[in-house]
Amino acid sequence: MTSDPTLLRGRAVAFLCALGCAFFPSSASAQAQEGEPPPSPAPLPLPAPPDLRVAVARVKPAFVRLYVEQRRRERAGAEAPEPGFLALSGTLMNEQGYVLTVGDALEGAEAIVAENEGGEIVLADFIACDEVTNVGVVRVADLGAQPAEFAQEESVQAGLPIFALGNPFALGITVTPGHVSGVGRTIELRGREWSNLLQLALDANPGDQGGPIADAEGRVVGMLVTRLWHAPEEAEDVEPHGIAFALPIGEALRAAEAGIRAHREEAGRVPVPWIGVRVQSIKSEALAAQLCLKPDEGLLVERVFKSSPAEQAGLRPNDVLLRFGGRSIGGLDLFGQLIREAGAGATITLEVIRGGERVELVVEIGTRG
């Protein structure tokens, strides 16, 4: 039977096309065989920044603006909204009207005025100032504010999104977002020493000191105490570096509650138990191994203050504190708590490592300030 020529030509073309595909693969297949990388996938979208509006609404009722008529302005380092007054920030702690803020601006104050979110103004009473932590407490009545919700200390880690409520340059309530960029910081700034601070990536300004640092759930995690700046002491208005420091809220509340107790008992200032050392946690695994310790076990003595109880007891820089009155020292917070619990006048045995040997020293706890 004779085949249709057109049909034969069509079959031949189809056969040749199939043969060509077998011997000459597509360009995409050829690139893969030659080892060229496939096209990069599209980048994943970054998560959107948290919407802080709900969290801010939860913290605002506890936020208090403070204006302090101060005899010694040079110690406060805060902006004056009008002659003789310094602007600070604070957080209502409880329904009894106690407000948490920084303490140095409160000392020697002629008058302290508190203002809530709605602009209501009342006079506040000075309650206490802790010289070590710079925690201050004032008390207000009938301000109509609501106490803050406080976070657990262990929930605060580097990278945590946070925001500050403040009163920069007495402009009014201001929200400043940022994040926790470090924990456990020790700094010496403007004649004061702090330890175990939260380092914050945010711009703080005069008037923000003492204000709450809160997380995206509206829980207060710290109290703003200072910011990093390099300027002559007399300069107040300098450009911020985007680095601020906050006291962890647990430590701030403990100092405030101690001050409130002392005020109730003595109607006076907080006596601060003190031995006169600056210490740091042992983070280095190499150093911990050299001392036959675990990381974060014990505290390394950085400085012993002159004429302090620690110097009189024979404590030296580079000693490693292991035990305080028979109790293990597990960190900066616990060390401070042990000193406060023992109280001024108590005689305590310290166990330290010095030159690879364990030594016992006896210290009588004194007071600071």
Image: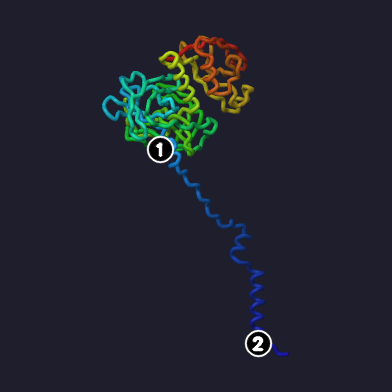
**Other residues around mark 2 within 10 Å, as few (<14) / some (14–19) / many (≥20):** few
- Seen at 64% across and 75% down, the residue is 17
Q: How is the image coloured?
A: rainbow
Name which residue type carries label 2.
Pro
Pinpoint residue 120: horizontal percent, then vertical percent.
33, 31
Does 88 sit left or right of 354 as displayed? left
Q: Is residue 43 above or below residue 348?
A: below
Dot 1 lies on which element? strand
State which quadrant residue 15 falls in.
bottom right
Q: Label 1, label 2: how many angstroms apart (C-alpha)? A: 83 Å
Is residue 229 something one can see in this rendering? no
Q: Nearer the viewer, mark 1 or mark 2?
A: 1
Q: Are marks 1 and 2 in contact (CB under 8 Å)?
A: no
Q: Position of residue 100 (x, y in %)?
A: 42, 26
Give the structural element (helix, strand or loop) at label 2.
helix
Query: What residue sits right under mark 2 in the picture?
Result: 5
Between disc 1 and disc 2, whose residue precedes?
2
Q: Which mark is residue 176?
A: 1
Front residue of 291/68: it is 68
Which image quadrant is residue 286 in? Answer: top right
Q: Nearer the viewer, residue 66 or 275?
A: 66
Which picture quadrant has residue 363? top right
Q: Position of residue 182 (x, y in %)?
A: 50, 33
Q: Residue 285, can we see it?
A: yes
Report the residue that reaches farthest toward the left.
83
| The N terminus: image quadrant | bottom right
Task: Tell me what residue is drawn at x 57 percent, y 18 percent.
Answer: 321
From the viewer's side, name the closer residue of 4 and 348.
348
Q: Residue furthest bottom?
A: 1
Q: In the rendered view of the protein, which quadrant contains the C terminus? A: top left
Above or below — where is 172 with respect to 108?
below
Mark number for residue 296? none
